Amino acid sequence: MDRQRNKRWLDFQRRAEYAPAEVYQHRIHGWKYIPLHPFADEPEVLARLGLRPEECLAADAWWAVDGDAALLECRVIGGARRSSGLIFQPRQTSSPRWLPIQGIVDSPYVTRVVFEGLMESAYRAGFPNGARFRAPTERLVLPL
C-alpha cells in the first residue's frame, strides 16, 4: 500500500473511531462510510433537522474501500446542471492527497440507495485499485 493511500485509510479510521455511531455500512458490499449530509430516505434524521426529502439534492461521505478512502460527493442532475457521470479530480494540495469523486445522478433527490449505487459504479470503474487511480494527476470523467 503506498504512503498516501495508507494516510487516507488511517484518516478515515480516525474519523470512524471519533464518531462510531455515524459510520454506515454499504448494504451489499459492507464498505464503511461516514455521511456528511442526510439522505432523502432517512425520515427520522430529516425530521430532527427540519428537512424534507426533496431538499436532499446532494450528499457527501467519507468512504473506506479496499484499504483506501475517498470523499464521495453525490449531486442530482437538476442541482448540478450536468449530465450523469462520475468525475475523479485529484487534489494535489492536500495531505493526504485525497481523490474526491463527484457523482452526478439522474434522480429527484439523493437517497441512501442512490448513494450506495454510486459507490458501486465507482468501484466497477476500478476505484481504488485500478492503475489510473494509483497516482492520479488528471481529471477523469466517466459516464454512469
Image (cartoon, rainbow, N blue to C red):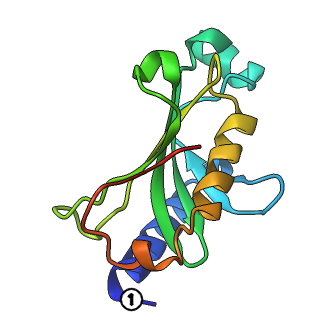
Which residue is rendered at x = 66% and y = 60% of the image? 32
Residue 20 seen by the camera: no
Q: Quadrant of the C terminus?
A: top right
User: How far from the left and from the top, in percent, is residue 86?
Assistant: 49, 46
Position above or below: 132 against 52? below
User: How far from the left and from the top, in percent, is residue 68?
Assistant: 50, 73
User: How far from the left and from the top, in percent, is residue 19?
Assistant: 57, 53
Position above or below: 111 against 69? above
Which residue is rendered at x = 61% and y = 26% of the image? 106
Residue 141 seen by the camera: yes
Which residue is rendered at x = 53% and y = 78% of the image? 129
In depth, the one of 93 and 118 nearer the eye is 118
Amino acid at the residue labelled 1: Asp
Q: Residue furthest right?
A: 28
Q: Residue furthest front?
A: 143
How many labels, in total? 1
- The image quadrant that residue 49 belongs to is top right
In depth, the one of 126 and 48 nearer the eye is 126
- Helix, strand or loop status at disc 1: loop
- The image quadrant that residue 110 belongs to is top right
Circle 1 sits on which residue? 2
Pointer 1 local density, CA inside 10 Å: few below 14, some 14–19, many at least 20: few
Position above or below: 143 against 56? below
Q: Residue furthest left?
A: 93
User: How far from the left and from the top, in percent, is residue 101?
Assistant: 44, 51
Position above or below: 82 against 78? below
